[in-house]
Image: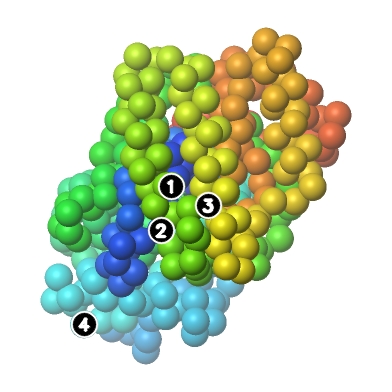
């Protein structure tokens, strides 16, 4: 019986996914683009085994409750249905996230689970197919199948809403993750984006603008124009947060220290250091920079944050099977 582990890294969107056009199939309202990071990942193994009474899910060696297990079970059902498997599964997953980072992400989790289920079910799915499957677990997981810069194309239906690798990001690209607060967020992304789509008067403007940002950032990546890429990243993230503020009730994930981090990025730029921030559905700030500048930038952040709040990440690779 195989018990091979599959590793998937998390990703940070430079052009954000915020809103679905189909909640059940997890079809996004717009395309998005991300950078996969090496510093945060999940290792997962799946074994289908009749000896198990029911699906059994361990996360970081802790047996998970019914709610967490149900999410995994429903996801595995997609593989069981296709492969004609009726056995329960034993799932073991470990999140590798630097202590207190608070960045445990459904992106790496669901992508690694898709990869492990693919092995266990013998379906031999391609990466493109795995990207489609990962999407059914969590939108951002769609992109974690690949390394470097990755685009999740919104597609026209469930059959063509998948990610494609754009560029391996092997051109002096880095990201400083500033952990402002590692607490679990109060409102999940899923609920937050639903409320934004339904109630924010800015949502149509967001869709129009993010579509333009995507086409421009792809051109900037193609021409390796770091400044342009950074400017679009920072602007797109702020527009997503502006759209959330327009929701009813208003939605804000920022904390005072998030603003401290953003101000420092602006200050560094004024001093001639190219760096740009982005934020997701939480208070942490991610600073896109040149990898060769990352330690210098980290030092400046150390005036305001503890060393364990500052993590330098390099571009990460795509899904991979770990050798036993
Ligand atoms: C992203 N985020 O593009 C955006 C930007 C957060 C802010 O994707 O409902 O966990 O499972 O599809 O993918 C986080 O939301 O949500 C996210 P579901 P997901 O990375």
Cα–Cα span, label 2 and label 1: 10 Å
**Residue 266 in view, yes or no:** yes
Residue at the spot of label 4: 86
Tag nearer the camera, 3 or 2: 3
Q: Is residue 36 visible?
A: no
| Circle on res. 243 | 3
Q: Are marks 3 and 2 in contact (CB under 8 Å)?
A: no
Q: Quadrant of the N terminus?
A: bottom left
Nearest to the observer: residue 259 or residue 245: 245
- Tell which circle, 1 or 3, labels the residue nearer the N-terminal end: 1
13 or 167: nearer the viewer: 13
103 to 304, vertically: above or below: below
Residue 323 percent location from the top left of the image:
36, 45
Residue 90, position in %: x, y? 39, 74
Task: Tell me if 65 is positioned left or right of 19 in this view.
Answer: right
Q: Residue at x 26, y 76 (%)?
A: 77
SS class of the residue under badge 3?
A: helix
Q: Nearer the viewer, mark 2 or mark 4?
A: 2
Name the image quarter holding residue 307.
top right
Tell which tag, 4 or 1, sits nearer the viewer.
Answer: 1
């Amino acid at each position: 019986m195989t018990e091979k582990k599959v590793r998937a890294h998390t990703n940070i969107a430079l052009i954000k996914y915020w809103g679905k056009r189909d909640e059940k199939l997890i079809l996004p309202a717009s395309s998005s683009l991300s950078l996969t990071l090496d510093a945060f990942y999940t290792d997962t193994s799946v074994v289908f085994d009749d000896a198990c009474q029911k699906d059994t899910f361990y996360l970081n060696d802790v047996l998970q409750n019914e709610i967490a297990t149900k999410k995994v079970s429903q996801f595995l059902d997609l593989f069981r249905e296709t492969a004609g498997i009726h056995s329960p599964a034993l799932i073991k997953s470990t999140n590798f996230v630097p202590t207190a980072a608070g960045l445990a992400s459904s992106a790496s989790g669901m992508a690694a689970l898709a990869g492990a289920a693919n092995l266990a079910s013998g379906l031999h799915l391609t990466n493109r197919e795995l990207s489609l499957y990962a999407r059914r677990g969590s939108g951002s997981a769609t992109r974690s199948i690949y390394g470097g810069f990755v685009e999740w194309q919104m597609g026209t239906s469930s059959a063509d809403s998948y990610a494609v690798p754009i560029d391996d990001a092997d051109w002096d690209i880095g990201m400083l993750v500033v952990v402002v607060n590692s607490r679990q967020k109060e409102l999940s992304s899923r609920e937050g984006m639903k409320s934004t789509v339904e109630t924010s008067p800015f949502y149509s403007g967001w869709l129009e603008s993010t579509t333009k940002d995507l086409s421009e950032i792809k051109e900037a990546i193609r021409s390796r124009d770091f400044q342009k890429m950074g400017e679009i990243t920072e602007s797109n993230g702020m527009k997503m947060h502006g759209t959330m503020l327009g929701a009813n009730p208003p939605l804000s994930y920022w904390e005072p220290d998030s603003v401290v981090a953003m101000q420092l990025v602006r200050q560094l730029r004024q001093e001639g250091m190219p760096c740009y921030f982005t934020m997701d559905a939480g208070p942490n700030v991610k600073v896109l920079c040149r990898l060769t500048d990352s330690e210098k930038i980290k030092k400046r952040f150390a005036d305001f944050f503890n060393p364990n709040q500052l993590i330098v990440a390099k571009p990460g690779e795509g899904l991979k099977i770990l050798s036993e």
